[in-house]
Amino acid sequence: MRSEKDISEWIEAYVTNRLSDLERKNFETRLQTDPELQGAVEREQLLHRFLLEKELYDIRQTMAGEIQKIERRATLQKYVAIAAVILLAAGAAYFYVNSLTNKSLSRISKVQIPGESQKNIKREPIGEELDEHVTDPSTDGTVPHSEHEKGENERKYSPLKEQQLLMDTSNKNPLGLEIGKEAENSSKLFSKEDSAFSPGKDPCGNGQLKASFTTKASQKNQKTGVIQIKLYNYVSGSVLYALDPGGEFVKEPYFEHLASDKYSVYAKEESNCVYLLGVTYVRETWCVDEYPKTYSPNYDAPWILPIGEGEATSVIIKDKTGSIVFDWAAPFAAETTWTGATKTGGQAATGLYKVFINYQNGETCVASVTLFQ
Amino acid sequence: MQGQKESKIVHELLRGNDREVLNYLYKSCLPKIKSLVSKLGGNMDDAKDVFQDGVVIMYRKIKLGDFLELENPDAFLYTICRNIWLNKMKKDSKMMHVERMPDRVDDQADIQRQWDMKEREAQLMGVFEKLGDKCARLLRFVYIKQLKPEVIALELEMASTDVVKTAKNRCKNKLQDLIQEHPQLVKILTDKT
């Protein structure tokens, strides 16, 4: 037991349950025989209970508010958790789609030359500025060679212009959006015909080049067509090009003296992987020149319009007022005929007519013909 | 509080960490009490009222030293809340059958109880106001939060622990005198609730 000086502390410790079992036992023994101590303890207990009641009163008064605070925190935490899950899911989905797209946009195929090691290829997002010019295929300008002689090791390529044919074998941009149906159709056509370089394969496993082609039509029965290739991935090291994977690869992304035909364009990088860049068409000049210039159903056989094998989706002929006199839709046919009749079966009037041939890639070739009845 | 053992609840309450304990009990017990009250015909607001009453009863019992150790405070609180709700249902059921007869003993007792509670609160607050804010804080630190004199000196910006002891004795005497001036309050405090 402590000294008499500390008796108030003993009482306080007893009332607030801070004594050990032994101390409590000793204190209670003395308490039974000490009326003065009993009175002091009772007063202390009253005081303690008063303070406790006041504390409980305060707790009761504030508990509803505290519970509201807890609930608000819990609700906020729930929303934060939901938001975090959504963000994570969106992020995961983005990276998943991105990785899939990168794979599918990566090289279509590869021919690995034995003994040669692969090198890393750096790529840059689509949309970088390009110094080169793109020749409009609808004009008769030729593609200047000098435009393609720059930047042998690292080049930057520009986005496509409208006239260019997009020969993306995946049909997806890096965000997974469709680029164009024409490219999809081209891929399908190609994959049926050339399984060795079928789209979707990525034997090199290091990405896929994307390319666009600008073609200039060839003159009728002459080899005057041109294909210009434009890569719009960023690559390090030089890329060689060929129209035959087994043939000679050249440095210039440019081919000329081509007859009207369908062409597969291949690229070979320093790693010696050979990729199919895509498929493009060199058409005959009649599409953009006015061929044939005259047509008389009275004396001639029905006019056969060569529209390119597997390319055209529709042919429309309009008179000089813009009214449609002929409307034909048969995708992938090689040709169609016009007898000089209108859509209602009557004879079309003598005069100038415009022929619109719509192709899978979105191009429309326009020819003019003068009809003599 | 979360993550600590349930047995620490008593300790935390005795140290005056009421808010932390409430937070813990809210998460661990309130869902069960909501479920119980819901099954027994109550709604969410009823469950919260029952929970609050139960927590206060539990606090009082622990702080008065009725439970120096409580193995399962969750189950203890759940039992208290269950009893509170069953008593309330029983009382409501009787009131529905009798259609609120004003001379009913139960009603009179209930009215008396409510009056007592109001009276108790009024007496408490009256005494507390007379005690003064500084003494109230000091005695709360000593008896409820059970802080050491050194800590109290810092909290109340007192020069030393001796000043704390002197002030404490002065405040205790003042409060004891005030309580003795209110015999009804003495009676209320002496009753085991």
Image (tube, coloured by chain):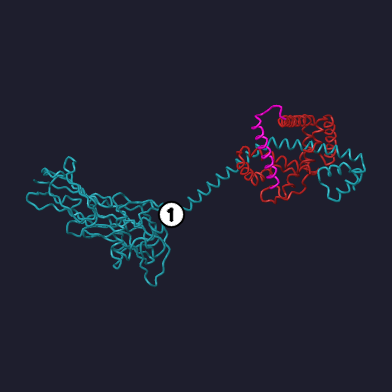
Chain colours: A cyan, B red
- Residue in the image at 65% along x and 32% along y: B97
Quadrant of res A224: bottom left
Tell me if A26 is positioned left or right of A279 in this view. Answer: right
Q: Is residue A40 above or below residue A240?
A: above
Q: On the image, numbered disc 1 is attached to which residue?
A: A97
Name, please, the residue furthest toward the top: B102
* Residue nearest the viewer, comparing A306 with A250: A306
Q: Is residue A38 magenta?
A: no
Camera-nearest residue between A295 and B35 = B35
Give the residues in magenta: B75-104
Direction from residue B120 to residue B99 in the image, left or right: left
Residue placed most toward the observer, B179 or A86: B179
- Residue A42 x/y as whole percent: 86, 38
Crowd class of label 1 (few under 14; some 14 to 19; many from 20; radius 10 Å): some
Decide if residue A21 is on the left or right side of residue B97. right
Foreground residue among A198 and B106 = B106
Number of dots carrying numbers: 1
Which residue: 86% across, 51% down?
Answer: A22
Does residue B91 show up magenta in the picture? yes
**Amino acid type assigned to the residue bearing label 1 in the image:** Val
Identify the main secondary structure in magenta.
helix
Chain under callout 1: A
